[in-house]
Amino acid sequence: MERAPLYSELACGPDDGEAWWLAARDGVRLRAGLWHREAKVGTVLLFPGRTEYIEKYGRAAGHFAARGYATFVIDWRGQGLADRLTGDAMAGHVHHFTDYQHDVAAMMAAARALDLPRPWHLLAHSMGGCIGLRAVMEGLDVASAVFSAPMWGIKMGAALRPFAWSLGWGAHRLCLGHHYAPSTGPAHYVLSEPFETNKLTNDREMWDYMARQLQAHPELGIGGPSLRWLHEALREMRGLARRPSPALPCLTILGSDEEIVDASRIHDRMARWPGGRLEMVAGGRHETLMDTPAMQARLFAMICDFHDGAGQGTASA
């Protein structure tokens, strides 16, 4: 695999970070990043959310390294330093939502080629939680799964939902799917929204950390989703909602002040996940893992404890 850039000074992760270019089977170039390759306990396969990129999870990798885990992160197609899919590099776009599974396959092939420490565990945030749900339903090679505010539904008013479906469907038929979804545009949320009204984090320092990364390397960021992305996401979430949960140890973390994904879909899914656990975080917003130091410390310890337990179960099986 060819080496790729990793902006370590902005990631603030362990000092052994590495990155590579990967190729999905449909030819899209992706980027994967790794921290703490010599881990002794296992590897966290981290599926980021929409608009995210590898460097944003440098501090998370530090938490995992302290507990003996490697962290392997991907830039999904259309974001980070992966290939963009339309002429507008700032549009969050995908042709078919299941195309992300090509990215998952490339990531897993790279994990095997790098011989990353086992057992492997999934941590999937927001859009990554939708991608990750299909992946584990289809047999992803992990011992456990943790979801952070997974995008199993998008929060919108009941009156807007039929409009979103019809708009996405019509835009596709009229070849306008590359246009931005209503009320969105090319600006990245972190660089355009004041901290005081943001829906991601309560912690100003974490907000500034994200902003510094995008100010230094704006090529990492994207803006709003395209109409095609929105339509494909709605289709994917509807289809996955009809399928049973897999027999896999699962922990899902959800902030009480969530305003981006549909919390009711998460409660419904976890009520149907055999042995699954839903952890509600009082005062948490969309990114509980990038909130106050106290919240981060508690949640990363919880995740590592959960992975530890699942890993021991795998070893004894």
Image (cartoon, grey):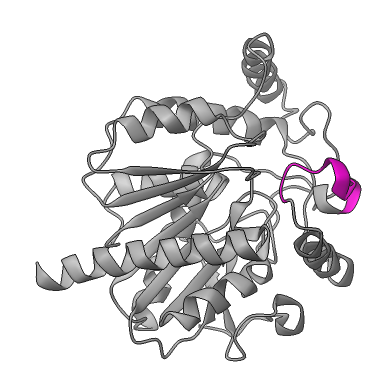
The residue lying at 67 percent from left, 53 percent from top is 78
Closer-to-camera residue (310/142)? 310
Q: Relative to 105, does residue 244 appear above or below in the rendering?
A: above
Which image quadrant: the C terminus?
bottom left
Q: Answer with the quarter of the image where residue 121 lies.
A: bottom left
Q: Is residue 191 left or right of residue 255?
A: right
Residue 84, how many percent across, how many down?
Answer: 71, 55
Q: Residue at x 40, y 68 (%)?
A: 304
Q: How many marks?
A: 0
- At horizontal 57% and vertical 78% (from top left) the residue drawn is 62
Which of the two residues, 92 or 121, is positioned nearer the viewer here? Answer: 121
Viewer can see residue 186: no
Image height of 103 relative to 13, above or below: above
Which residue appears at 62% of the width and 43% of the height? 94
Write down the region rendered in magenta: 191-201
Horizontal arrangement in the rendering, residue 172 relative to residue 33 (left or right): right
Q: In which image quadrant can residue 5 be found?
A: bottom right
| 173 shown above or below 293 | above
Provide residue 126's location: percent of width, then percent of height.
Answer: 56, 46
Q: Position of residue 23 (x, y in %)?
A: 52, 68
- Asked whether 173 falls inside the magenta stretch, the response is no
Q: Position of residue 175 (x, y in %)?
A: 72, 27
Q: Examine the rendering and report whether any part of residue 276 can be seen.
A: yes
Query: Residue at the left extreme?
Result: 317
Is residue 297 toward the left or the right of residue 202 in the image?
left
Q: Is residue 272 above or below residue 53?
A: above
